[in-house]
Image: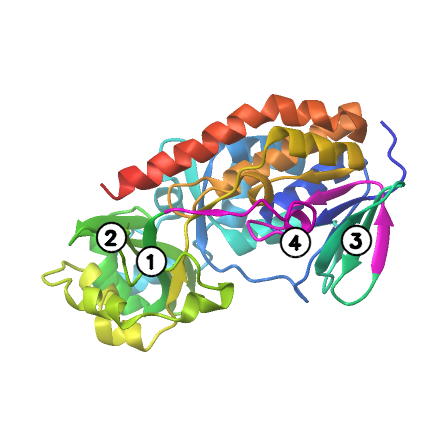
Amino acid sequence: MSIQQPISIIGAGIGGLALSRCLLRRGIPSVLYERASSPTRHRYGITLHEWAYRPLLKVLEMDEDVFKKRTAVTGETEADVNHQTGSNAMDPPKLGDRGKAGSCRAHRAKLEDLLREGLDIRWNHGLERLELDRTGVILHMQEGQSIERSCVVGADGVHANSRRSILPDIKPTILPFVAFNGKRWIPKQIFGALYLPALNGSFKLERRKNNARLHISINEIYGDSVSINWIYSRAAQEPSDPLFKPNRPLTGATDIPEKFYQEIRGLIDLSQPFADVFDEDKLRKEKVLSWLMRTVEIPLPELQRLAEKGVFLMGDSLHAQPILGGEGANVAIMDGIELADHIANNGIKGMSNWYRNKYLSWSDGVERSREAIREMHI
């Protein structure tokens, strides 16, 4: 189906990139508008499930083994790790495939680099707001530019300006959980001594201590170091919890209460590598982020009303799942693939039907993510 004017996609994250790449393969023009001035280096690992990445292989026209090598958290340096540590545990197939059946570990920056190939991305083009008029949609950009379009897709995440400007009453729900996150570069010698024996070929470790969930996972290997990601999380405590601040501003993510470090201090008798990661003195010297677990749900009639105006939402801007327990990246990929297929086969006029067909599965996905994070912290 011929579409003359490029489809405008707000946000060059995984979902927006997947949509644009799928449209490109279908011969449908699109332009991505991204507020960042250059590609963001998301240097951490994510879990991809085969129900999401295998359909993507057809779009990329890529063999599964090639895809896994292009996006692996390990690079060309895993042989160096084995040499220095005397271990073969960093063998990429073992590290990439162990975990849930049918899943693999991918480096987000590498995945986004792969998806960006051949796409028209306008960097430093942040959306200020959308305006609906009789002829279409006007994109008011943060740098002052106004762009008229007949079709706009908001893929700009849980804090989407695309959604907030046209559905101001729809706000994320904050789930009652406390979560703190950080990253650390570990010298290979230390990694080989403390981390590899416990990992035993996997890419992550988890355990419970003092009603908290402790998580360690591998982000990437680079040079003489290994990047790891850690998460400290637990259910919020009633009636008031000094670590649970659902009304904090976005800029408050780096304001870490002293109570957090007190709880870390109470994690005594940890085995390695948990004792190395959750060390109070080390954490005080590093960047720690406070996460809020958010979900988003939008009534179907609102989505259909916007579709009639040429505005569509997808991914976290439409049905966000919490970082812990959610499948945000996987669902965003599938949204991109399926939305592109629908546009190619039916044009943008039939989007109300797409929403109606997908809405129940989105709602079920959000509810499953809520249940998953509850079960993680029982």
Q: Give, as a single range, the part of the protein colored magenta.
A: 146-175
- The amino acid type found where label 1 is placed reads Phe
- The amino acid type found where label 4 is placed reads Asn
SS for dot 4: helix
Q: Going from the N terminus, do you reach mark 4 or mark 3 first?
A: 3
Q: State the separation of the CA atoms marked 4 and 2.
A: 32 Å
Relative to 347, residue 189 above or below: below
Q: State the separation of the CA atoms marked 1 and 2.
A: 8 Å
Nearest to the eye among marks 2 and 3: give it.
2
SS for dot 3: strand
Residue 168 highlighted magenta (yes or no) = yes
Q: Give residue 237's mark.
A: 2
Where does label 1 land, which residue?
A: 244
Where does label 4 land, which residue?
A: 161
Q: Quadrant of the C terminus?
A: top left
Where does label 3 land, which residue?
A: 139
Q: Are marks 4 and 3 in contact (CB under 8 Å)?
A: no
- Rendering coords of residue 241 (x, y %): 27, 58
Q: How many marks?
A: 4
